[in-house]
Amino acid sequence: MPLTLTIEKNVPLQPYNSLSLPAQAEFFCAVGSLEDLGEALNFAKKGQLNVTPLGGGSNVVLSGDIAGLVIQLNLLGMSYAIEGAAVQVTFAAGENWHRTVITTLQKGWFGMENLSLIPGNMGAAPIQNIGAYGVELADLFHSLRAMEVATGKVVTFTKAQCQFGYRDSLFKTQCRDQYIILDVTLSLTTEPQVNLSYPALRSAAEGHANYPNLTAIDVSELVMAIRRDKLPDPLNLPNAGSFFKNPVVSAARAADLLLRYPDMPHFAQALSQVKIPAAWLIDQCGFKGAIRGAVGVHSQQALVLVNFGGGTGQQLLALADEISTAVAGRFAIALELEPRVYGPC
Ligand SMILES: Cc1cc2nc3c(=O)[nH]c(=O)nc-3n(C[C@H](O)[C@H](O)[C@H](O)COP(=O)(O)OP(=O)(O)OC[C@H]3O[C@@H](n4cnc5c(N)ncnc54)[C@H](O)[C@@H]3O)c2cc1C
């Protein structure tokens, strides 16, 4: 079969990242098949180039040019098997996440609805174990296949092997930059069920005409409405969603903070830990709506940093640093960035 791969040099990445940050890829290609991906990896190996996989670019901060080869994963396709009520569906890495949610709901398969409208592609979903409204990828995950960058070998990872945690996985830790995810298999069900465990979703559901008999499609629509209301659309106001992870502290530390800040929202976690919304901490430090030249903090959502137009990754990271320093100074809590930074930090 003739190879279709085109590798370009010095490609602007502004159209490929949801923060619309200016940066160039030293080399860039888009791959639509495993053969193309294999060829791209050979090219990188021969030139001793770093490889950077790219999906929808909605969870990256480009603070400078990317040396080496940026590979946009455009692998497409879906296959599935049904046994009783259990559905196992496999989506290729380049499938748009939200479109896969809608496809499964249209087929009467349930489980993904709380994760409606999360930007990006299937291949990136396991990297940070995406989550929203009381559900995370790990809850639906069965397995994935990935190509090892160094060898081109295709390997299957089970759920246990992926070591999913809060916005975390093996692919952000021990296996960082070592694999390119090719496809992801999810376990869904044809049995109608809804998960309204997340407080804001439950309140919205209680106001719905179908309550308490909401369908998964109702839940998906509610989640979309809440998200549209709360989060800026990157097409109108470039952003990468949450810029910081919600910090998790010990129960003792949380109790200490609650003595001083009785109104502090907090959520009990496993192992006597407590999650504190980073947005609340940032808001308390007065950053909601802060503007620093071409970048700033969204006026309604303190966790979302935005590029008003013409901003750079360096400017955004300087603002993130200012915020982290203020939060550390006031609450003695270290904030951690959620998106992956490429270029100087
Ligand atoms: C408005 C907005 C709202 C958001 N809301 C949420 C939310 O509710 N919950 C949540 O968890 N996230 C959220 N995000 C973050 C983002 O949507 C997710 O992290 C998403 O999974 C990123 O997908 P992507 O394809 O854009 O990844 P990219 O930004 O392209 O890549 C992210 C990282 O994954 C790596 N990567 C991408 N594809 C592959 C692959 N195939 N193999 C190996 N590595 C790969 C990249 O190298 C990079 O390090 C939001 C973002 C925005 C802009």
Image (cartoon, rainbow, N blue to C red):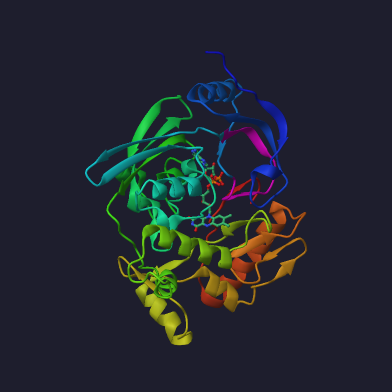
Asked whether residue 166 is in view, the answer is: no
Q: Is residue 3 left or right of residue 66?
A: left
Write the residue at 55% across / 23% down. 45
Q: Position of residue 251 (x, y in %)?
A: 35, 74
Q: Main secondary structure of the magenta part?
A: strand
Q: Is residue 65 magenta?
A: yes
Write the residue at 35% across / 53% down. 111
Q: Position of residue 167 (x, y in %)?
A: 44, 55
Query: On screen, 226 above or below 51?
Result: below
Name which quarter of the figure residue 284 lies in: bottom right
Asked whether residue 250 is in view, the answer is: yes
Q: Is residue 282 left or right of residue 315?
A: left
Q: Position of residue 298 (x, y in %)?
A: 65, 67
Query: Relative to the observer, which residue lies in front, 275 or 220?
Result: 220
Q: In the current view of this chain or complex, which residue is farthest to the front?
A: 209
Query: On screen, 151 above or below 130?
Result: above
Q: Is residue 83 left or right of residue 3?
A: left
Q: In the current view of this chain or complex, which residue is farthest to the top?
A: 1
| Total numbered badges shown on the rendered structure | 0
Q: Is residue 341 magenta?
A: no
Query: On screen, 231 above or below 170?
Result: below
Q: In the current view of this chain or complex, which residue is farthest to the left?
A: 84
Name which quarter of the figure residue 267 lies in: bottom left
> What are the residue bounds of the magenta stretch?
57-72
Query: Relative to the observer, which residue lies in front, 59 or 223?
Result: 223
Name which quarter of the figure residue 82 lies in: top left
Q: Position of residue 187 (x, y in %)?
A: 31, 46
Write the residue at 27% across / 53% down. 191
